Every structure is written in C-alpha cells, then in structure tokens.
Image (cartoon, rainbow, N blue to C red):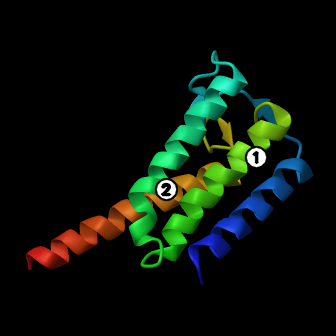
C-alpha cells in the first residue's frame, strides 16, 4: 500500500465521521491551543507545518507508507475541514477529560509516534 492511499483513506474516514457525529467547531489546534488565533492564521500555520513535513520526509514515504500516510492524511483532513468550515470539527472526547478531538488528530499523533519509533528502532539496530 502506498502512503497516498493510506492518507486518502484517512481523509475520507475523518471527514465522513466529522459530519456523521454531532461535533463542535474548534478554532484552535490540538487541545485548544491557539484558540485565540483567527482561522486563517491557524490554517497558514498548519499549511506551513505540512509543507515542512513533506519537505523533510519525502525521501522516506516509500519506506514507511503507513506512518507517513497517517500523518499527511490527518493533516490534510484537518486543513480541508478548516478551509470549508472555518475550524475543525471535534467529536471524540478524550477519556477522563473535557478535551475533544477527531480521527485526523489521532492519525497525526499515531503517524508521528510510528515515525519516531521507526527512527529509534533503526538507530538502535544500526548501533548493534
């Protein structure tokens, strides 16, 4: 499976669930950070961060399609939601908190954790 197939599936699944479930519109980013920023400012920040991720990570896409697909797909899904709605629809409540997020947030977090884990594993294996 290619990274763009994983990413495309994340986008479709995330945007479908955001509008399927009752959700609140969040103008900030993860955990309510930057909630005082305007939506265009947050959009530009997210777009810039996605560009940096793509620029730094493009050489590894074919090696780790799931992790990069999750990361990029989640980022694109949230950017599209913000572009269309002026914010991101959050509907999943984090257990034990009042914080809400969405599948794209989970995809980004899981993708980042997988990438970090893969690099750490490769570094440990290389040192042996």
Residue at x 66% of width, y 33% of height: 43
Residue 25: image quadrant is top right
Outermost residue toward the top in this view: 36
Residue 79: image quadrant is top right
Left or right: 118 in relation to 108: left
Q: Is 63 rendered above or below residue 97?
A: below
Q: Could you tell which of marks 2 and 1 lies nearer the N-terminus?
A: 2
Residue at x 29% of width, y 66% of height: 119
Q: Which residue is mark 2?
A: 54
Q: Which element type, helix, strand or loop, lies under badge 1?
A: helix
Q: Is 34 rendered above or below residue 120?
A: above
Kindly report which numbered mark, 2 or 1, lies closer to the viewer in this rendering.
Answer: 2
Across and down, in percent, residue 97 comes to 61, 35
Across and down, in percent, residue 64 comes to 45, 75
Outermost residue toward the bottom in this view: 1
Observer able to see residue 41: yes
Residue at x 17% of width, y 72% of height: 124
Observer able to see residue 90: no
Across and down, in percent, residue 45 comes to 56, 32
Q: Which element type, helix, strand or loop, lies under badge 2?
A: helix
The answer to which of 75 and 94 lies nearer the viewer is 75
Residue 88: image quadrant is top right
* Residue 80 image label: 1
Q: Residues within 10 Å of mark 2 (few under 14, many from 20)?
A: some
The answer to which of 18 and 46 lies nearer the viewer is 46
- Which quarter of the rendering shows the N terminus? bottom right
The answer to which of 111 and 86 lies nearer the viewer is 86
Q: Residues within 10 Å of mark 1 (few under 14, many from 20)?
A: some
């Amino acid at each position: 499976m290619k990274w763009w197939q994983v990413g495309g599936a994340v986008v479709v699944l995330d945007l479908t669930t955001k509008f399927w479930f009752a959700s609140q519109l969040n103008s900030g980013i993860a955990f309510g950070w930057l909630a005082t920023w305007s939506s265009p400012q947050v959009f530009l920040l997210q777009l810039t961060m996605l560009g940096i991720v793509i620029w730094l990570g493009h050489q590894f896409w074919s090696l780790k399609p799931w992790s990069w697909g999750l990361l990029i797909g989640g980022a694109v899904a949230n950017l599209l939601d913000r572009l269309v709605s002026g914010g991101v629809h959050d509907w999943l409540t984090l257990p034990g908190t009042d914080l809400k997020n969405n599948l794209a947030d989970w995809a980004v977090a899981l993708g980042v954790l997988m990438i970090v884990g893969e690099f750490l594993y490769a570094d440990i294996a290389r040192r042996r």
